[in-house]
Image: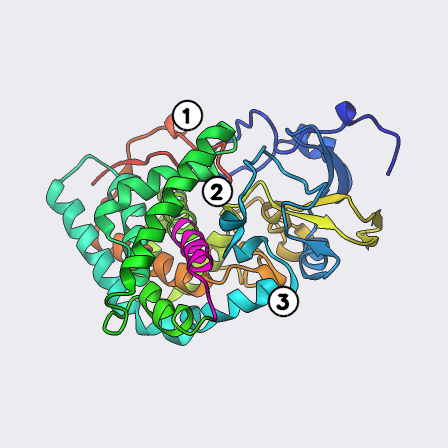
Amino acid sequence: MTATAATDLPLWPPTNPDHGPFALLDEEELGRLGEPVTRVRLPTGTTAWLVTRHADVRQLLRHPAFSANFEKPGFPLVRPLPPQSERDRQGGFIRMDGDAHTRLRRMLTAEFMIKNVRRIEPMIQQTVDEALDDLQAAGPPADLVEAFALPVPSMVICHLLGVPYADHGFFQARSRTLLDRTAPVDRVRTEVRELREYLRELVLARHADADTATDLISRLVRDRVATGELSVDELVGMALLLLVAGHETTANMIGLSTLLLLREPGGLDALREHPDRAPTLVEELLRYLSVVRTGLPRLAVEDVEIGGRLIRAGEGAIAVLSLANRDPEVFGATDEFDPYQQAHQHLAFGFGVHQCIGQPLARAELRIALVELARRFPGLRTTATPEQVSTRETSVVFGLNSLPVTW
């Protein structure tokens, strides 16, 4: 580390980005970051290493010397978080390391394998079709986020978990608070507790009908909780993670992707005429949009060299997926969206042992949603000017607040 004062370091994330929905940083901000591995100050008053190059991000995220446990002293938080009780810590494997993480993740791995996602694609297709039926019946104008982008992944994850979609207003509001970097700590604590209690009641109710129900929570109650392999608190934590991540990230990707394709000449037309190209397009959308823009924080538990910099034990590091996904050494003209680019090396889902377990599901939802939207609404267009598009700048998961459209 150098003797540079924290106040002289660039702030991460930038306090008031005004780049529109597709640009990440302006030239001045990129210039302040300087090297691919550089020191930054965080809103919490601490410092961390910001890692932005594709190869360096991969190295960091797969290296066992970096911990994902945010309760370790020195962990690089971009916002204050409420203290967790022992019960609240249970099941959140995304913040666990080693065997504790592996044990819980393995219980879900088979559920989200590609072959199992293919098996539920008819359900995803039906969900998309019904949402588009409702959109068409209501007629223009519409907010595509509220009417389509958010309901589709919410209904899908509710179906998979066994959560009543009628309660979507309750869990969507609390999910947004949980992901809002500016939400007061007390409010985050209260609303997360409410969400956990809601899921706890749901899990406990599953004991009565677990033998016949087919949803994921019921199967875990029957196959894991009943055998003592999994506690109720652990299942509640797992369900919380899947519920929040299962609709927030995909909802924001659908909204942003639609806006991008509406702005691209012939963007939706090409998808309608050549739906077989959708898988390639989806990978480029994931690369270019990268909705987890604040990055993935980690704490070094031993000295490690990343990108020519020595990160010492006890220092924080943040892997910035969005900037790694625009690394010119890997993706060429990276500030340009190229629907024909083979972008399979992108890191939108992270990398290493903690990479997103639900990525096959997210890909399927995004592909089906965009293909069917293009097919059903050939005259779709946005009524908002670029200046009128409202984005979720303070959320851990970037996206649109709304997308006014007509057809």
Label 3 secondary element: helix
Residue type pointed to by label 1 = Glu
Q: Which residue is mark 1?
A: 387
Mark 3–mark 2 distance (CA, rounded to whole Å): 28 Å
Q: Which residue is mark 2?
A: 397
**345 above or below 198?**
below
Mark 3–mark 1 distance (CA, rounded to whole Å): 48 Å
Q: Position of residue 241 (x, y in %)?
A: 45, 53
Label 1 secondary element: helix
Q: Position of residue 256 (x, y in %)?
A: 40, 43
For the N terminus, give its image quadrant: top right
In this picture, which residue range is highlighted in magenta? 229-244
Question: In the rendered structure, which disc, 2 or 1, sits on the residue that comes first in sequence?
Answer: 1
Q: Which residue is mark 3?
A: 99
Q: Position of residue 173 (x, y in %)?
A: 34, 37
Residue 21 seen anywhere in this rendered image of the structure: no
Query: Magenta stretch: dominant SS?
Result: helix
Question: In the rendered structure, which disc, 3 or 2, sits on the residue that comes first in sequence?
Answer: 3
